[in-house]
Amino acid sequence: MTRKNKNTMLSIALLTAIGFSAPTLAQTQEQQKAQREAQAATEAAAQANADAETARAAAANADATANTAQTSGAASISADMASDNAVQAGTAAGMASVAAANANTVADDSATGNMQTKAAAETAEQAAEIARAAGSVAQDAAVDAQVASQTAAAAALAAPAMQDPPALPPQAAPAAQANVTFTDHPGNSISPNYHVDFEAMDGNHDGSIVRAEASGNADLMREFHVVDANHNGRLTREEMKGWLD
């Protein structure tokens, strides 16, 4: 065999080896991607559960504050808000945990050959996105719950101490009186808190207002859950129509 023939055979052997190894390399990369996405989903779920626990602790603290003897109605409203946010954070954390479990399942199936590696990588990536989105919701809810807890504490601190009313002197039986007519007149006081600058309140300029951004407006904080028509913890311009100046 000539040197030229030997070189030709060597080239063919090398190309053949590369051709056989390419699918294996691609498969390994897809498996690694599935594993990475599963890990990302797991981390997002863990953080979401930690945020949910933070929200629950804030709600418990707000509730304890509202149950003290010298609280105001504002403290009770804030405690309810904290409780609602704790529930929202818990729901989001549950969604993140389910997504993480799905991502890990397909990653394991990919590694054991029970599922095509490309499909597994794509499914794991989608699950990781769901887990991250749910984790973001849980984080926002936890922040809102903490703000509501702080608002409850501030309201309780500002509430006047409860005192027994002074004793009234005995009164003689009232004399018969002529009929009295009462008329009602609408009030002429409108709270300035019902007119807000949406752009100024939307601190991060994402087109919506969360409770943390609305915390400086007592009236809006009190009615946040009513204005939030779709109960997603964010107020859009459409939902804020009645509040805009």
Image (cartoon, rainbow, N blue to C red):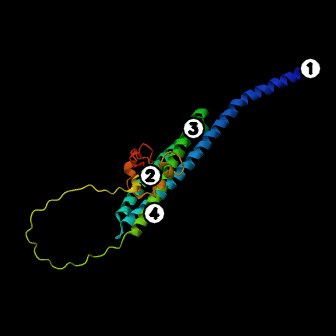
Dot 4 lies on which element? helix
Rendering coords of residue 132 (x, y %): 54, 46
Q: CA distance from mark 3 to mark 1?
A: 50 Å
Comparing labels 3 and 2, the label whose residue is closer to the camera: 2
Q: Do the residues bearing badges 4 and 3 touch, measured as CB atoms within 8 Å?
A: no
Rendering coords of residue 165 (x, y %): 26, 75
Q: Which residue appears at 50% of the width and 48% of the height? A: 199
Dot 2 lies on which element? loop
Q: CA distance from mark 1 to mark 4?
A: 88 Å
Pointer 4 residue: 150
Pointer 2 residue: 196
Three-letter code for the amino acid on which mark 3 is drawn = Asp
Q: Which residue appears at 55% of the width and 42% of the height? A: 129
Label 3: how many Cα within 10 Å (few below 14, some 14–19, many 20+) = some
Three-letter code for the amino acid on which mark 4 is drawn = Gln
Which callout, 3 or 2, points at the residue further toward the start of the chain?
Answer: 3
Which callout, 1 or 4, points at the residue further toward the start of the chain?
Answer: 1
Comparing labels 2 and 1, the label whose residue is closer to the camera: 2
From the viewer's perspective, tell me whether residue 30 is left or right of residue 19: left
Comparing labels 4 and 3, the label whose residue is closer to the camera: 4
Three-letter code for the amino acid on which mark 1 is drawn = Thr
Rendering coords of residue 239 (x, y %): 41, 45
**Dot label at residue 2:** 1
Which callout, 3 or 1, points at the residue further toward the start of the chain?
Answer: 1
Q: Do the residues bearing badges 2 and 1 touch, measured as CB atoms within 8 Å?
A: no
**Dot label at residue 109:** 3
Q: Which residue appears at 92% of the width and 22% of the height? A: 3
